[in-house]
Image (cartoon, coloured by chain):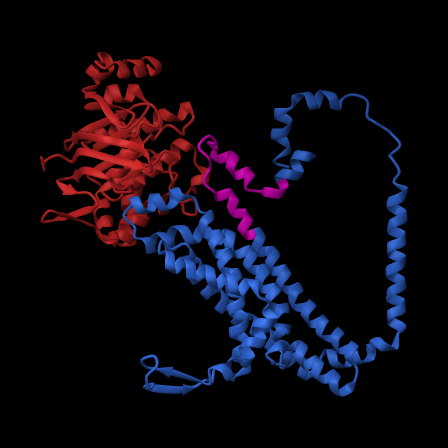
Chain colours: A blue, B red
């Protein structure tokens, strides 16, 4: 191993001691560890065996509906809701984050007000509201307020339940995304903006080429978490009520067949499949972006020799080598 | 007002809240001159430097670079604040080097250098890269172009930062304690680059604690304390035969 050599160089004393008598000792026993493990495994096995035999779980129906065409189509609806809502939330969240960092106190306050409302009320309640908003605003009008409108357009946006669901989820999520983006932008050292300004770059160029690329390291990992969270939150569109998503369709089928439990299991299996795939993706994204620490600007005192820096770039190997 | 001076400060004042950081600073730097500003920390040296490229606004007095009012436009007897774009235009000719280097950590040394010429001056990339390699060569880092800042020593990072500032072909270079964050054995390599720059005729204002550098390279030295220029003059006089008590007291501690 590459790392073990410098360790030996640093601690020559360790080598001399290695020549002393090897320790042969009776290892300490941990009886409680074993007993607790045995009890837990037994309880789990009991539960599984019992569940497999209980008719209420309807395992045959689980198999029957797991790949039902209606279910797999609904799974696509859930996925598309997640994607559209997240895209909308990221765009609006970025806007809100920039508004909160604005020097204009009115702009700042409006962004704060938005966050206060959308983070302070349950998403379920918000979705119910967006479901009935078309009753409050049946037409969109353009014109001078309190005069006859020039143009009237019937409110087709909030009568389309799918679009309503995307908007409702995105508006709620934007409040959370804006905090993530804001934290990312604030994490970038002030000296970066200063250096960029001193080089005569405009505010826009500074943001685009200097601040945002560095903020992404902070922004992307929690955004992955939000995607996973959003996938599950889509089940709340029942509040609108939209019933073509995964949970809605499985509930719809069970209302006809009177077999609610197997269809809950079917929906859960699909949700687990999606979240598992996303978690694997999340794991790689986090690995990719934590690696960036190797490129972070070294502090004033840490003048890294290039050859040493190369070694520290292998993060895990170094740790293991150091302990061994 | 002399419009021939590269930098002309006329009774410049600046305060942060109730803290008067600069109190009526007046000084002049001619083209091709090197001015070293020395003094205890908190004396306003760095703030004064940051006013010259309008990173900080001044509260009173007038500050001119090449005869042009910094950050403002005079119309009749009224001053108008410049738009960000106009302020940026003034900064194009002023390079700045920071104590903590402030290199962009997500870019290689070469990418750091070509950013401003490409984005601000719209220099084609191939031409910017060619020029950047020349500058890397000039600061003695010809082989480090593709290294990220974290893989360079402090002294190397600061030399890249100097090359980055030079890439905009500035007429004036501001150095804000460029060696204060460096390990002692790395200070020399940065000072050597700065000496070479001074010999080539660059106008420089250097805030520094390196008295040896000031003595050898500076055309004039200004001693600042408590927001005022206590004393200024050629290095041999100011460092060798200071007139003011405060200057004597400071120099006796650092020399």
In the foreground, B186 or A230: A230
- What residue is at 39 percent from the left and 31 percent from the top? B155
From where the camera sits, is residue B47 visible? yes
Quadrant of res A98: bottom left
Q: Position of residue A152 (x, y in %)?
A: 38, 87
Q: Position of residue B180 (x, y in %)?
A: 38, 28
Q: Main secondary structure of the magenta part?
A: helix
In the foreground, A1 or A42: A42
- What residue is at 58 percent from the left and 62 percent from the top? A226
Q: Is residue B226 above or below residue A193?
A: above
Q: Is residue A119 left or right of residue B120?
A: right
In the foreground, A133 or B107: A133
- What residue is at 48 percent from the left and 56 percent from the top? A181
Quadrant of res A320: top right
Residue range (magenta): A288-317
Q: Position of residue A15 (x, y in %)?
A: 70, 23
Q: Is residue A201 above or below residue A63?
A: above
Q: Position of residue A245 (x, y in %)?
A: 63, 78
Quadrant of res A56: bottom right
- Is A301 covered by the magenta stretch? yes
């Amino acid at each position: 191993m590459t790392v073990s050599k410098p360790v030996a160089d640093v601690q020559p004393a360790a080598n001399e001691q290695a020549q002393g008598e090897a320790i042969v000792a009776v290892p300490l026993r941990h009886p409680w560890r074993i007993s607790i493990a045995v009890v837990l495994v037994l309880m789990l096995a009991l539960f599984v065996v019992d569940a497999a035999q209980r008719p209420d779980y309807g395992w045959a129906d689980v198999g029957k509906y797991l790949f039902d065409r209606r279910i797999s189509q609904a799974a696509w609806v859930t996925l598309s809701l997640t994607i559209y809502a997240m895209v909308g939330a990221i765009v609006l969240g970025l806007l809100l984050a920039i508004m909160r960092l604005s020097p204009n106190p009115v702009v700042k306050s409006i962004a704060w007000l938005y966050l206060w409302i959308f983070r302070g009320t349950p998403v379920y309640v918000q979705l119910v509201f967006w479901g009935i908003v078309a009753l409050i605003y049946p037409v969109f009008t353009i014109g001078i307020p309190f005069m006859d409108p020039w143009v009237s357009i019937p409110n087709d946006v909030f009568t389309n339940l799918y679009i309503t669901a995307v908007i409702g989820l995105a508006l709620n999520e934007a409040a959370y995304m804006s905090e993530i983006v804001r934290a990312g932008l604030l994490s970038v050292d002030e000296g970066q903006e200063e250096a960029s300004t001193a080089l005569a770059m405009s505010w826009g160029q500074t943001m685009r080429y200097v601040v945002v690329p560095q903020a992404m390291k902070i922004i992307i990992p929690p955004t992955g978490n939000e995607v996973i969270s959003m996938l599950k939150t889509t089940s709340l569109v029942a509040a609108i009520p939209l019933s073509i998503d995964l949970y809605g369709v499985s509930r719809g089928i069970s209302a006809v067949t009177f077999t609610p439990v197997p269809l809950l299991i079917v929906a859960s299996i699909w949700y687990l499949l999606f979240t598992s795939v996303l978690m694997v993706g999340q794991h790689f994204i986090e690995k990719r972006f934590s690696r960036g620490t190797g490129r972070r600007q070294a502090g004033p005192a840490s003048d890294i020799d290039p050859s040493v820096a190369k070694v520290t770039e292998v993060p895990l190997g170094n740790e293991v080598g150091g302990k061994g | 007002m002399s419009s021939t001076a590269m930098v002309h400060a006329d009774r410049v004042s600046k305060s942060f809240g109730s803290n008067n950081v600069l109190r009526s600073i007046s000084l002049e730097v001619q083209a091709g001159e090197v001015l070293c500003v020395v003094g205890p920390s908190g004396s306003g040296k760095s703030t004064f430097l940051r006013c010259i490229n309008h990173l900080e606004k001044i509260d009173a007095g007038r500050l001119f670079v090449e005869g042009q009012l910094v950050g403002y436009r005079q119309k009749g007897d009224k001053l108008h604040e410049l738009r960000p774009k106009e302020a940026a235009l003034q900064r194009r000719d002023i390079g700045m080097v920071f104590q903590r280097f402030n290199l962009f950590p997500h870019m290689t040394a070469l990418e750091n250098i070509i950013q401003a010429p490409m984005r601000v001056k719209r220099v084609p990339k191939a031409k910017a890269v060619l020029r950047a390699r020349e500058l890397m060569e000039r600061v003695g880092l010809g082989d480090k172009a593709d290294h990220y800042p974290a893989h360079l020593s402090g002294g190397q990072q600061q030399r890249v930062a100097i090359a980055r500032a030079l890439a905009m072909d500035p007429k004036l270079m501001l150095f804000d304690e460029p060696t204060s964050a460096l390990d002692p054995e790395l200070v020399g390599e940065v000072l050597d680059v700065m000496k070479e720059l001074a010999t080539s005729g660059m106008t420089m204002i250097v805030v520094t604690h390196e008295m040896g550098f000031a003595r050898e390279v500076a055309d004039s030295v200004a001693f600042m304390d408590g927001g005022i220029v206590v004393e200024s003059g050629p290095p041999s006089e100011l460092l060798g035969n200071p007139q003011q008590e405060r200057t004597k007291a400071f120099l006796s501690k650092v020399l």
